[in-house]
Image: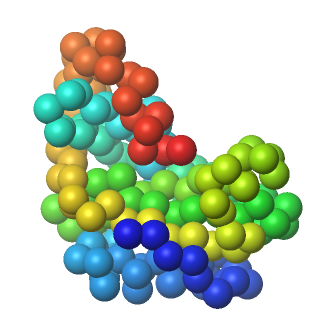
Amino acid sequence: MVIGMPEPQTFDEAISLFQDFLRKNGYSPNLVWIERADVLIPLRREIYVKLPVSRNSVDRARALFTVGMTKRLGVRFGTVCALRNATCCHAWVPANQAEHESRLMCHSLKLQANTDHLIGTEVKNWLRWQFLKLRYRRFTGLSRILFE
């Protein structure tokens, strides 16, 4: 499900709108901002999430929000998967006006929630994460789909 929202003035307003949207769609409002490097997706409808995520992940989401709103390209906040008590999400901004138009972006905030509620598996052990990265290295391109 995807909806366009009234233009929030700040990142905090956008987060509040996103959390309300997630609640209405059966997701936890506790957000974990992730990036492609934090996710492994084998073909069997599994998703592994490396935790803890970088301390800068919220700052990167904030920066993307600022760029998307300032350049009037829009910004999309979307879900990646659900964890026990949180929702893994990401921010995305079109690279240019052509991508903005081809992705049917609005000029402000667009919210997206996957309707299939993919459940993520938390990976907190560094060694296990390295093993999984090696084991599923041929599937690394699949995470691109979720982040674009």
Q: Is residue 82 left or right of residue 109?
A: left
Q: Is residue 20 left or right of residue 13?
A: left
Please tell me which residue is depicted at 26% across the width and 18% down the height of the picture: 136
Query: Is residue 126 among the parts visible in the rendering?
Result: yes
Provide residue 122's location: percent of width, then percent of height. Answer: 21, 45
Viewer-closest of 73 and 85: 73
Please tell me which residue is depicted at 85% across the width and 61% down the height of the picture: 71
Provide residue 129's location: percent of width, then percent of height. Answer: 27, 26
* Image color mode: rainbow
Q: How many marks?
A: 0
Query: Is residue 59 among the parts visible in the rendering?
Result: no
Provide residue 112's location: percent of width, then percent of height. Answer: 44, 66
Please tell me which residue is depicted at 57% across the width and 62% down the height of the picture: 76
- The residue most toward the right is 71
Provide residue 57's location: percent of width, then percent of height. Answer: 54, 51
**Residue 124 quadrant:** top left
Viewer-closest of 47 and 104: 104
Viewer-closest of 90 and 126: 90
**Residue 10 quadrant:** bottom right
**Residue 61 quadrant:** bottom right
Quarter of the image containing the N terminus?
bottom left
Please tell me which residue is depicted at 21% across the width and 53% down the height of the picture: 118
